[in-house]
Image (cartoon, rainbow, N blue to C red):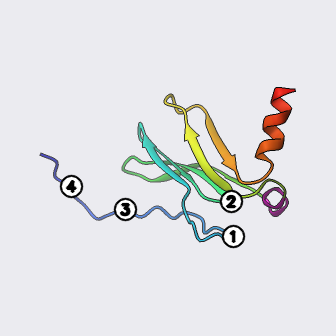
Amino acid sequence: MYMAYGWPQVIPLEAPNCVSTQQIVYLKVVNRLLLVVSPTHVELWSSSQHRVRLGKYKRDGDSIRKEGENLRAVWSPDTKLIAVLVSIELLDKMEAFRA
């Protein structure tokens, strides 16, 4: 039986600076690591007793206009790679790989 103890913890995520109503695109915990992907940025947190932000990548406005917002993400099982799907220019990049 699992018994929770202590006060609930809140992780202070950065507020998105976009017009999208979707706040979180991807959320996953693996081996005490928490990955959060929003439409404009990616954050990696320690999910152990002491919550510490280990890294953050925030896209600038030019990147968001050119490639679009983050739509989906995939995190590799070994937690070494993150792939993020964006909303614009997906077909152009796919065609470049075929050539």
Please tell me which residue is depicted at 59% across the width and 45% down the height of the picture. Answer: 73
Pinpoint residue 22: horizontal percent, then vertical percent.
57, 66
Residue underneath mark 3: 9
Q: Quadrant of the C terminus?
A: top right
Question: How far apart are the two marked residues, 2 and 4, measured between alpha carbons?
Answer: 33 Å
Q: Seen in the image, is 72 located left or right of residue 40? A: left
Instruction: In the rendered structure, find residue 17 and report the number of the disc placed on it.
Output: 1
Q: Residues within 10 Å of mark 2 (few under 14, many from 20)?
A: many
- Magenta range is 60-65
Measure the C-alpha gap from mark 2 to mark 3.
24 Å
Nearer mark to the viewer, of 2 and 3 = 2
Tell me the amino acid under the disc marked 4: Ala
Dot 2: element? loop
Secondary structure beneath label 4: loop
Q: Amino acid at mark 2?
A: Thr
SS at circle 3: loop
Q: Are marks 2 and 1 in contact (CB under 8 Å)?
A: yes
User: Which amino acid is tagged 1?
Assistant: Asn
Per the model, the C-alpha gap separating discs 3 and 1 is 24 Å
Q: Earlier in the sequence, mark 3 or mark 1?
A: 3
Q: Is residue 30 above or below residue 87?
A: above
Q: Quadrant of residue 92?
A: top right
- Marks 4 and 1 sit apart, C-alpha to C-alpha, by 35 Å
Residue 20: percent from the left, percent from the top? Answer: 64, 69
Q: Mainly helix, strand or loop, the magenta region?
A: helix
Residue assigned mark 2:
40
